[in-house]
Image: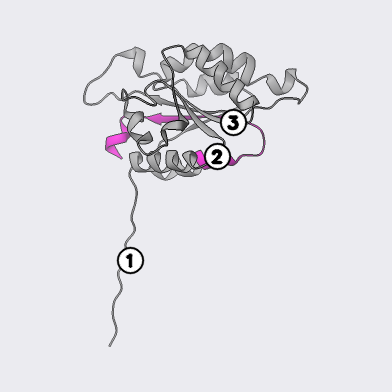
Amino acid sequence: MLVQVREFSFKMTYFEELKKSMDYLSNKQDTIFIGQAVEYAGTAMTNTLIDVQSEKLMEFPVCEEFQMGTSIGMAMNGFVPISIYPRWNFLVLSLNQILNHLDKIIDISNGGYNPKVIIRTSVGSERPLHPQDQHVGDFSDAFRLMLKNIEVIQLKEPEDIYASYKKAYEREDGKSTILVEYGDFYNEK
């Protein structure tokens, strides 16, 4: 007698892949999560951190440039910060630290410093309610043109998420990474 076996493929959702990625990063001894709505609820990203140990969460007020400067300092001291900006439009406010410091520090220190920061940001959700233009910018292409030592990765499909966050953590080329999420995909994919 032959028994037919069905193969089931379980595909995780966009949100589940993000949560899996944050859980993976939180289990690394040298990681810390920095940003707005990291420790306290406030954005859709907060729910992806629900199982991250509280001692790894560092809540920041709305001070984007200071947050990135702190992230760089922590990276220079052996941490791998996951610096979270709920929207690209907010991340733009830290451009000085990203462009003139994080991206250039390996060059201006003649290779003496090469801090690795994982930068997590998002294009704001437009559905079911459009929050207006100050929350839905996608500046990925513009940042790619400006940066030479930081990679920008757009996370458009669920299956790309975990591998991209893992790459950002494990990379040995010394580059920092900006990972761009899409708010509408949290519930759509």
Mark 2 crowdedness (10 Å alpha carbons): few <14, some 14-19, many ≥20: few
CB atoms at circles 3 and 1 under 8 Å apart? no
Disc 3 marks which amino acid? Phe
Q: Secondary structure at mark 2?
A: loop
Residue on which disc 3 sits: 79
Residue placed furthest toward the bottom: 1
What's the CA distance linking mark 3 and mark 1?
A: 42 Å
Magenta region: 165-189
Mark 3 crowdedness (10 Å alpha carbons): few <14, some 14-19, many ≥20: some
Question: With 115 as the anchor, is 118 left or right in this view?
Answer: left
Residue 14 at least partly seen = yes
Q: Earlier in the sequence, mark 2 or mark 1?
A: 1
Residue on which disc 1 sits: 7
Q: Secondary structure at mark 3?
A: loop
Above or below for 136 versus 189: above
* Of labels 3 and 1, the one closer to you: 3
Above or below for 97 versus 30: above
Residue 159 image point, x, y percent: 42, 45
What's the CA distance linking mark 2 and mark 1?
A: 37 Å
The numbered mark at residue 29 is: 2
Disc 2 marks which amino acid? Gln
Residue 29 image point, x, y percent: 55, 39
Quarter containing the N terminus: bottom left
Q: Is residue 171 magenta?
A: yes
Q: How is the image coloured?
A: one colour
Quarter containing the C terminus: top left
Question: With 71 as the anchor, is 37 left or right in this view?
Answer: left
* Of labels 2 and 1, the one closer to you: 2
Q: Earlier in the sequence, mark 2 or mark 3?
A: 2
Residue 108 image point, x, y percent: 74, 17
Above or below for 110 versus 21: above
Disc 1 marks which amino acid? Glu
